[in-house]
Amino acid sequence: MPIDSTLLKDLNLRHECDVHLGPRTWYGVGGHALIVAHPSSVQQLSALAARCHDASVPVYVLGSGANLLVADQGVQGVVVCLDDPCFENIDINGSTVTVGAGFNLAKLVLETAKAGLGGLECLAGIPASVGGAVRMNAGGSFGDIGQAIRRVMVCGASGQVYYRDRDDLIFSYRKTNIVARYILEVEFELVREDPDELMRQVKEIFLYKKVSQPLADHSAGCAFKNPTDDAHIPDKKPPTAGQLIDRAGLKGLRIGGAEVSPRHANFIVAHPGCTANDILAVIERVQDQVSKRFGVVLEREVVVWP
Ligand SMILES: Cc1cc2nc3c(=O)[nH]c(=O)nc-3n(C[C@H](O)[C@H](O)[C@H](O)COP(=O)(O)OP(=O)(O)OC[C@H]3O[C@@H](n4cnc5c(N)ncnc54)[C@H](O)[C@@H]3O)c2cc1C
């Protein structure tokens, strides 16, 4: 089946054809998608998933594009955006907060802190949609999103919608055991705390990030995961990816418009005129150099499409 509007026939689905994806990501680079679909209900998303599955059409789910590098040749498939209001709902009931996958994470952090509900303040300063944050188990040294999750509504690749409960969810460093293609809604169990103290923590964490990271540049945050204890490093506490890149003398390494940030070695930033190929070339060069110097294979954190 051709990947054009005929694929979506009868689904009555809002969609765009031949869409430049670069501007929809924080990197701002990359090629086109054949179709970007905006389902307006869970039923519509499920029907779209089933249609693409049956036609063996590749599907990509786009959040806020903050951890994403789209290749210059684009993606031959359907990109699904959960940006309809039906996926941006929020319901606060006591200490339980239920929120759609398309909801903005920064807004959620502020709203819950102001309401005196603790557990998400550790995510201050992380650009994301809620769905993207769960997929990546976003977080940092202050905690991660997984720790506050009670239940997640998901949809499998072939369209079946179901819940995953806390008991059977595993969250680890930038990883979850949620294999379903679409994360639709998340239920958080938060803790009553003093709103002023929570807001103080949100501001403190945000300022810490603002000082240590090049937040104003085009990037996808940390390009590589930090090596874990099982990496073959003699130190007790393995150095972070940023420390390894820095020690390899790679800060400021530039290929085309892509550069290892002089401010934070684990950020690869895009300057005007940068292409996805430039960024991929810097990623490869960094992996190669760090592997040669320290015998550590840096695993990419940034997701690359296709
Ligand atoms: C300046 C900057 C600072 C950052 N700091 C941090 C940090 O401190 N900690 C951290 O963890 N990350 C950080 N990041 C990376 C990024 O913010 C996180 O990875 C975030 O979780 C990405 O969410 P997103 O909605 O933008 O996902 P996207 O980038 O759109 O997508 C990322 C992945 O999630 C998938 N996905 C998105 N939405 C869904 C969904 N609804 N269902 C299923 N899959 C989905 C995509 O298919 C893709 O595989 C930073 C990024 C930037 C640009």
Image (cartoon, helix red, strand yellow):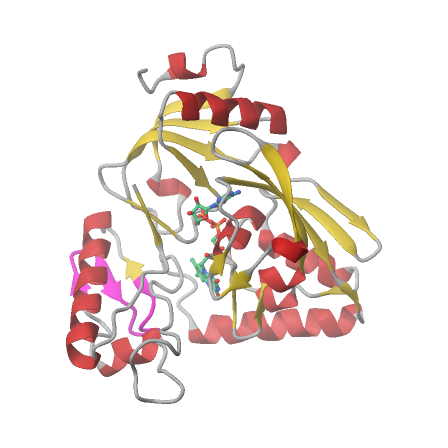
**Is residue 257 on the magenta stretch?**
yes
Residue 275 at least partly seen: no
Residue placed at 66% from the left, 55% from the top?
166
Q: State left or right for residue 14 relative to residue 4.
A: right
Residue 59 at least partly seen: yes
Say which of 47 and 13 sits in front: 47
Quadrant including the C terminus = top left
Q: State left or right for residue 234 relative to residue 61.
A: left
Residue 100 position, x and y percent, is 64, 42
Q: Which residues are magenta?
A: 254-268
Q: Is residue 115 above or below residue 3?
A: below
Magenta span: helix, strand or loop, mainly? loop
Residue placed at 35% from the left, 25% from the top?
56
Q: State left or right for residue 149 relative to residue 56.
A: right
Q: Residue furthest front?
A: 168
Say which of 56 and 300 sits in front: 56
Residue 154 position, x and y percent, is 58, 40
Quadrant including the N terminus = top left
**Is residue 130 on the magenta stretch?**
no
Q: Residue furthest right?
A: 94
Q: Is residue 46 above or below residue 117?
A: above
